[in-house]
């Protein structure tokens, strides 16, 4: 990350105050999003999302597993993010670990709900095959290929797109002789069920610079932030999760205002994502 | 298991024994890197990014009078068929990083970016043309970072990494003595097979990976596991070298097209 | 032919893709590649009877001259060399460059200038704040931070390589010095040609545009070349700010000095035009940049839409027209 001089910081700051950022965007405007689906053919679902120079790939694999004893009626989802050294030399070796775990945890919090599994953006009960015995384990793996700020929003968008692209194989269950036996599950190679993504939220990160908040900060703008709040919003305008980063304190009224802004921006982001997904699916079909 | 069908002579994926998989190279996939490239061999997909030449960050690593070349190889969690979380710095990654580094180091003209040696010689030919002569004993230390990220692994990953790194180094404008390309070959069902995919690779037969300097026709990387009789080894190695040459031809085409495009767009 | 989008990944619809391909095709046809394109390890055809001097990017292999870089072969009398494209900036004496301070060292500043090593700006190569021509004292050394600190953006001129191999800069004239109230863009160095003029004051817009030969481009509010007053005023305001001990907070004075919105719109427009032209790979000259800005104004393009697909394609088409008319004028 290159440092910025006092003059440049001042310029960025002034631009945000005047609602004209360095690349001409308004405060609440996202960079153009470009979406590709099915980039990892061997996965059940995958996507690549580009937000300016930020480039992330998400792959979703479904494997058979056992549900946890606490939640025998739910499948399991695990999210792992990795920052590739190709994005920045400082990610080499273990340099990217801190950022990777921060991103993984933030995404888990926003998409998977609480410890009890309540309020998860992803419907875990749709992943169960035989209650208490067999379920689908979804592994969501994200890779940051290139970074120019706003990784969390890009990753959440990529996860949403990948889930839209995910097909869970159909299973036929042959129950064993006794109820204690592990049932035999035939996994179909042909038929797939599209994952239900209507409840999956998007994440809107609002970065506070001075007295104003901006959406989709570039890495230059992120270096100026006093604090950032990431809010995950679903289609119905409900808040599914919230994370605050940065040391500066925020007045509670400010946070409430940010939430309402996030809801509004989240709607627009969702609709633009939907149209991008539709376009990507259409072009994939053409090919 | 029949890796080569005895009747038709086709392999499991429909190729002939001497057929390489579909290859594709693309330059400039990571905007922030000094040079970057994507290389695909069949289903194996690899991105290489170059950062450098730049001043050495960790002075302790500076060894001799040459630019330091560093390499890191990483595999994405989703790159293999069965998804596994790989810890960073596991032995296979370290070994492949070393192999790629040594191969690329052999072809990068590191002595042109050294410590205490002449680096740039531009001669004053005509005063009106304003060229200057610099003798530059340099005291700064330079390093070149090569980062390779595997997106999909379907056999031949180290070859794809070397090919991607070659493209990326050319993109970054780092002087090289030759184009390095790499390809693998094996021996299954009594037939030498070119460019093994994952299934063929894990069949237990020998896997010969060769890297060559295309123009000077020199072998710079040679690795093999398992046993092979000498005469068969020669055939398999020769086959791999043919594959390397074919890739070199393709890479040259990609670089030529890219250079031409950049020059045309630039204008006068 | 790929569209080669590196920085700007745009989703073009079918029509836009076709238009872009045809524009790029026309550009390709127009360029007469009299000088040969070469790829690494290609043999460069030379007349072996002449004594050829092998320059940068070439090496000797069994008596043949072989390229070590991808680029264009240039021949100047007996010198044969390869001009690479996306390689690092190659400094030449007298170049005007823009750099960023990365370290304040005794009697010098180290600057990052997109070269393989950092450049050095000696305290003795800088004008003193009081404008006097005198020897630098120990007090001056201690006050170096009052002139430039880390991360400051500075415009300077390449003085040359010293015997120890380091690259030295000088900033003695009034037109060099710290750049504030604007933004710095990075483009590949090969897109900026060496011209007589690198400082451009775009009067219509009140914008200063500095095209550093190293690929660092400064776009900012116009600053009169009052030289010493400017630096002095800075020092005064900095002391004021330190007194009030409000680091990171906004003071009354700083509020007053925010760039006015109108000039800011022009700055952003110019900056985005530079970004589009750099993404397309076109040479950056002040004429092309101003043309692009004027086109965006006349087309009523929103500033952020300059980076969108439609304007990208239109810029390519405009460039085709421009080069056609240029070649007609010549021919």
Image (cartoon, coloured by chain):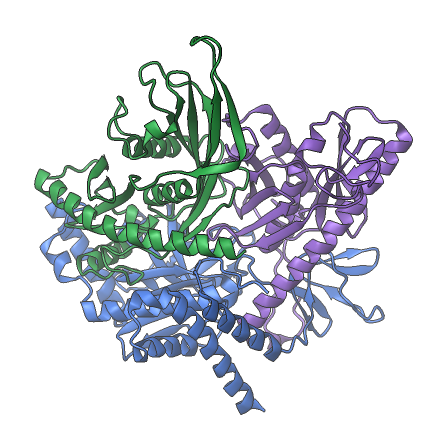
Chain colours: A green, B purple, C blue
Residue B263 image offset from top left, x and y in percent? 59, 69
Image point 52% across, 60% down: which residue? C89
State which quarter of the image contains the C terminus of chain A: bottom right
Q: Is residue B192 above or below residue B34?
A: above
Q: Is B63 rendered above or below residue C274?
A: above
| Residue occupying the far right of the picture | B231
Can residue A145 be seen from the camera position used here?
no
- Quadrant into which the N terminus of chain A falls: top left
Number of numbered callouts drawn: 0
Tell me which residue sits at (83%, 59%) in the image. C63
Residue C199 or residue A121, whichever sits in front: A121
Image vertical order of residue B83 relative to residue A42, above or below: above
Q: Residue B203 vs residue C154: left or right?
A: right
Camera sees residue B193: yes
Image location (x, y in percent) of residue C244 = 10, 47
Measured as percent of width and height from the top left, residue B168 is found at 59, 50
On screen, residue A232 versus residue C324, left or right, reads left
The one nearer the camera, B218 or C20, is C20
The image shows residue C92 at horizontal and vertical percentages of: 53, 65
**Viewer-proximal residue among C236 and A258:** A258
The residue at the far front in this view is A177
Residue at 12% over, 61% down: C256
Up/down of C160 relative to B166, above or below: below
Quarter holding residue C100: bottom left
> Of residues B65 and A151, which is closer to you in this image?
A151
């Amino acid at each position: 990350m290159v440092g910025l001089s006092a003059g440049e910081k001042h310029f960025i700051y002034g631009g945000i105050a005047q609602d004209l950022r360095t690349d001409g965007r308004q405060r609440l405007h996202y960079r153009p999003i470009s979406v590709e689906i099915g980039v990892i053919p061997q996965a059940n679902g995958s996507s690549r999302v580009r937000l300016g120079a930020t480039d992330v790939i998400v792959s979703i694999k479904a494997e058979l597993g056992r549900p946890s004893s606490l939640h025998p009626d739910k499948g399991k989802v695990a999210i792992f993010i990795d920052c590739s050294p190709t994005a920045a030399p400082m990610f080499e070796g273990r340099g990217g670990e801190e950022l990777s775990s921060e991103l993984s945890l933030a995404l888990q919090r926003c998409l998977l709900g609480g410890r009890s599994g309540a309020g998860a953006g992803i419907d875990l009960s749709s992943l169960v095959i035989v209650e208490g015995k067999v379920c689908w384990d979804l592994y969501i793996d994200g890779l940051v290929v290139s970074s120019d700020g706003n990784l969390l929003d890009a990753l959440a968008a990529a996860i949403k797109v990948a889930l839209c692209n995910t097909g869970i194989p159909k299973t036929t269950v042959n129950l064993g002789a006794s109820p204690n036996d592990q049932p035999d599950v035939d996994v179909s190679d042909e038929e797939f069920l599209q994952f239900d993504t209507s409840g999956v939220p998007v994440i809107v990160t609002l970065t506070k610079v001075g007295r104003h908040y901006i959406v989709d900060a570039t890495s230059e703008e992120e270096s100026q932030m006093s604090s950032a709040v990431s809010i995950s919003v679903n289609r119905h305008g409900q808040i599914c999760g919230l994370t605050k980063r940065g040391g500066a304190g925020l007045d509670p009224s400010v946070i409430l205002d940010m939430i309402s802004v996030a809801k509004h921006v989240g709607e627009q982001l969702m609709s633009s994502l939907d149209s991008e997904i539709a376009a990507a699916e259409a072009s994939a079909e053409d090919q | 298991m029949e890796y080569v069908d005895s009747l038709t002579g086709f392999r499991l994926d429909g190729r002939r024994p001497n057929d390489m998989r579909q290859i594709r190279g693309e330059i400039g996939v990571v905007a922030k890197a000094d040079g970057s490239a994507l290389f695909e061999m069949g289903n194996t997909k690899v991105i290489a990014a170059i950062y450098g030449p730049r001043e050495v960050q960790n002075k302790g690593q500076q060894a001799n009078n040459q630019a330091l070349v560093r390499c890191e190889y990483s595999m994405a969690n989703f790159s293999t068929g069965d998804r596994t979380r790989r810890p960073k710095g596991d032995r296979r990654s370290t070994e492949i990083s070393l192999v790629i580094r040594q191969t690329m180091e052999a072809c990068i003209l590191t002595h042109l970016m050294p410590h205490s040696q002449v680096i740039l010689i531009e001669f004053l030919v005509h005063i009106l043309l304003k060229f200057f002569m610099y003798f530059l004993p340099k005291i700064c230390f330079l390093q070149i970072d090569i980062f390779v990220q595997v997106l999909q692994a379907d056999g031949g990953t180290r070859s794809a990494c070397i090919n991607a790194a070659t493209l990326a180094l050319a993109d970054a404008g780092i002087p090289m003595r030759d184009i390095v390309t790499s390809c693998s070959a094996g021996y299954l069902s009594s037939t030498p097979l070119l460019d093994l995919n994952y299934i063929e690779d894990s069949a237990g037969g020998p896997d010969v990976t060769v890297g060559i300097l295309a123009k000077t026709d020199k072998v710079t990387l040679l690795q093999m596991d398992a046993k092979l009789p000498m005469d068969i080894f020669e055939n398999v190695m020769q086959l791999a070298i043919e594959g390397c040459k074919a890739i070199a031809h393709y890479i040259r085409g990609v670089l030529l097209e890219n250079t031409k495009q950049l020059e045309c767009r630039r204008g006068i | 032919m790929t569209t080669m989008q590196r920085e700007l990944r745009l989703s073009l619809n079918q029509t836009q893709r076709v238009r872009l391909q045809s524009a790029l095709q026309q550009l390709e046809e127009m360029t007469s590649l009299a000088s040969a394109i070469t790829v690494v390890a290609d043999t460069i055809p030379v007349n072996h009877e002449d004594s050829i001097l092998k320059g940068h990017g070439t090496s000797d292999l069994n008596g043949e001259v072989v390229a070590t870089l991808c680029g264009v072969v240039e021949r100047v009398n007996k010198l044969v060399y390869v001009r690479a494209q996306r390689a690092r900036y190659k400094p030449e004496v007298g170049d005007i460059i823009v750099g960023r301070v990365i370290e304040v060292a005794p009697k010098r500043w180290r600057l990052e200038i997109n070269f393989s090593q950092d450049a050095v700006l000696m305290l003795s190569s800088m004008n003193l704040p009081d404008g006097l021509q005198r020897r630098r004292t120990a007090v001056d050394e201690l006050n170096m931070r009052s002139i430039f600190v880390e991360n400051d953006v500075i415009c300077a001129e390449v003085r040359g390589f010293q015997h120890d191999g380091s690259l030295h800069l000088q900033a003695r004239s009034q037109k060099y010095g710290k750049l504030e109230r604007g933004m710095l863009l990075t483009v590949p160095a090969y897109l900026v040609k060496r011209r007589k003029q690198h400082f451009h004051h775009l009067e219509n817009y009140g914008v200063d545009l500095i095209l550093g030969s190293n690929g660092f481009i400064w776009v900012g509010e116009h600053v009169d070349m009052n030289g010493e007053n400017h630096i002095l005023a800075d020092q005064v305001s900095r002391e004021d700010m330190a007194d009030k001990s409000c680091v990171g907070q906004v003071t009354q004075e700083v509020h007053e000095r925010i760039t006015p919105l109108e000039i800011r719109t022009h700055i952003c427009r110019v900056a985005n035009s530079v970004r589009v032209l750099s993404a397309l790979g076109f040479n950056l000259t002040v004429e092309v940049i101003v043309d692009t800005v004027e086109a965006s104004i006349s087309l009523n393009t929103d500033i952020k839409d300059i980076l969108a697909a439609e304007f990208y394609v239109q810029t390519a088409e405009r460039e085709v027209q421009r080069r056609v008319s240029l070649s007609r004028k010549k021919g």
